[in-house]
Image: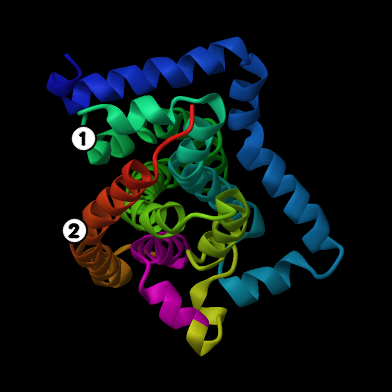
Amino acid sequence: MLDSMSFLDLLRAETKFMYADILRRRSLFFAILAYPYTLMIFVLLIGSSMGSQSFFEERVGLTPIIFLITNGFILMSMLSVMDDILWRPILDEFIGTMAYVVSSPTSRLKHYLAIPIPRLLLVFLSGVTSIIPVFTYYHGYTGFVEALIVLLMTVLASIFTIPVVLLLIGVIYGLGGGIWRITNVIRPILLIFTGVYYPRRFMPFIGRIICYAMPQSHMVEAIHLLLSAPQLDPVFVNILSLIGIATILIIVYSPLSYRSIHFWEHTKVKEGVKI
């Protein structure tokens, strides 16, 4: 019975759905593993033509390779959450399954919470094959431990992205009209204000205010702080504070996300679904 489906049942169904596609397109699997390296090489080549690595280290406080490989993984991790959730309603509309999704008695909130987890687990593997080797090469055993911490913090940052994306679903899909175009605009804006490739301390005042309102940006800042500090002890309290702020924002956004999903569902039921 559909109404008896638990979160684990939904998660199992989403896992089969996603991994069946990966098995069918094995090139996608290798592309996910190679993405952090590909992005790092591309940005490094472009950046090298504009300035020296020493200037980058002086300005950012990190070696370019470590900074870029880490941010490539963070970007991939967050995109796995954003894309899987934001594009699912469009996919359901396109393949004609929206009527069945809306009419199902299964909780829409549980469904959308289960959607990004399988791909996030796969992206975690790309971090194991990119973050750990690079960090270990540069810093040995200390780098290996640091890489594990960065992996866990990145997954946590991606999970913290979910309430924000769920909130946007209600606004974007609930209001309707050219939703795929709006989604294409929202994605890069979200990534900019997470501070992945443009640290929020370099942003103008308005940009920083927007960043402070996004829980995942605090997690990204904590990761950058961890990487740039010569020792963990002096920045440990600051990192915990950033994680605490992100957690508080998640608590604030969670009921809003719940209402947002139900607003979208109510709007879709009210207007009807074309099969």
Q: Is residue 226 magenta?
A: yes
Tell me what residue is drawn at x 21 percent, y 35 percent.
107
Q: Amino acid at mark 1?
A: Ser
Rendered image: mark on residue 107? 1
Observer-nearest of 59 and 137: 59
User: Residue 207 appears at what percent x and percent y?
Assistant: 51, 80
Q: Which residue is mark 2?
A: 255
User: Residue 211 appears at what percent x and percent y?
Assistant: 43, 73
Q: Hey, which quadrant is residue 247 in on the image?
A: bottom left
Asked if residue 228 is positioned above or below residue 152 in the image, the reply reads: below
Going by the image, does 187 lie left or right of 237?
right
Tell me what residue is drawn at x 63 percent, y 54 percent.
181
Asked if residue 44 is positioned above or below residue 3 in the image, the reply reads: below
In the displayed orientation, state which residue is furthest to the bottom.
205
Q: Is residue 104 magenta?
A: no
In the picture, the quarter occupied by the N terminus is: top left
Residue range corresponding to the magenta coloring: 207-230
User: Residue 228 appears at what percent x and percent y?
Assistant: 48, 66
Question: What secondary structure is the magenta-colored segment mainly?
Answer: helix
